Amino acid sequence: MSGESTPGHRGKDHPGKGRRGKGHPGKDHPGKGRRGKDHPGKGHRGKGRRGLKVAAWTAAGVVALGGTGAGYVYVKLNGNIESLDIDRVLGTDRPEKAGDGSENVLVLGSDTRSGGNRELGGGTDDGSARSDTAMIVHVHGGRTRASVVSVPRDTVVDRPECTDTDGGTHPAARGVMFNSAYATGGAACAVKTVESITDLRMDHYLEVDFTGFRKIVDELGGVEVTTREHIEDPDSHLDLKAGTHRLDGEQALGLVRTRHGVGDGSDLGRIRLQQAFVKALARQVGEIGVLTGPKKLYDLADTATRTVTTDSGLGSVNALMSFAAGLKDITPAGLRMITMPVTYDPANGNRVLIEKTKAQQVWDALKNDQPIPATVTGETATGEAKGLVRGF
């Protein structure tokens, strides 16, 4: 996704980084009313875009191919998966695991501007990556519903002391942007920061690749969405007239990355588009009937496993198959998506603050495996892009 600040038309600072090393400060670019370019963070393998159904494609690929080639397919797909031992790094000083059958998964999107990725999304190329999208996916105990909470990257938080996967320790910091956690200490620091904010145990972690997202959409035959207004954003290479469209991979990538062409030009508006697209993508996966096409299914599974980085608990095809079995009954109707309740920061128009009372209601609901109260999304900052895209 794009790496700019909320609402993007006043300020600059924002850290960039890589997946495992120390980050270096970057700059945000103008949002509303102007057209800035995205900018890089740091890392050696970019990960970016939606990951909610990746495990299902992987599992289906192995099951459908079957037969004498199953062993080869298993080894091939298993070798594609990159995993990080988040639990080892974080240790035991964490929220307790839920005992009610529910699970929390932190899904991160990050991207690089190196190689072909630069052509897809613009921005400069210094071989670096950043995480600008974070979704807390709560799979409810009955495995028929999921609640998804998007965390704006520009949220001001107190980042806890954390250790990265290379063993480096990073001191705590007060009043910093949420995505500085990933920029500072990679995935492990991002997980620790989310757990600190929510007091919820993140049972798993998924991070998804930039170009892989495009390929998956193309292999699915596109994803259908309806735009209620003309959306144009040269920075994300997007130009969609109002109406119904079947987006190919590059168009889909532009949609989930755009911010200048929607709402108030903020990251909050872009989150609205991402949530609509995730539901449209979930519907597309449910309707495509991929089990009837083994070759197509293998291509999807191969792309998906090359795309995803996981915690070590999901770091094999068997583990992903088991996880996918818990998602198969979740339909778009059973997917509740909200943005973490926030308000604009009066001291800095490019930042948002956690609306603590309402946010606590969200975390309490998830901790008790209950639906998120409808009242928590009222009178919070939204980015003025609600209903702009209908994907479901």
Image: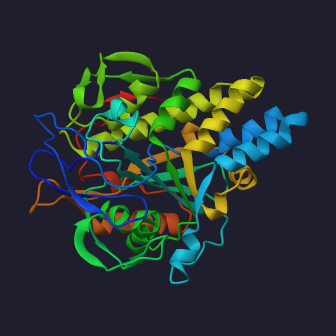
Relative to 70, residue 129 above or below:
below
Kindly tell me whether residue 329 is visible in this rendering: no
Percent of width and height locating residue 329: 68, 43
Percent of width and height locating residue 302: 65, 37
Q: Name the image quarter holding residue 119.
A: top left
Kindly tell me whether residue 392 is visible in this rendering: yes
Q: Nearer the viewer, residue 185 or 8?
A: 185
- Residue at image point 45% right, 29% down: 391
- Residue at image point 11% right, 59% down: 348
Q: Nearer the viewer, residue 72 or 162?
A: 72
Q: Name the image quarter holding residue 156.
A: bottom left
Q: Name the image quarter holding residue 70.
A: top right
Percent of width and height locating residue 154: 25, 56
- Give left or right: position of 149 versus 41: right
- Give left or right: position of 281 versus 346: right
Q: Nearer the viewer, residue 100 or 190?
A: 190
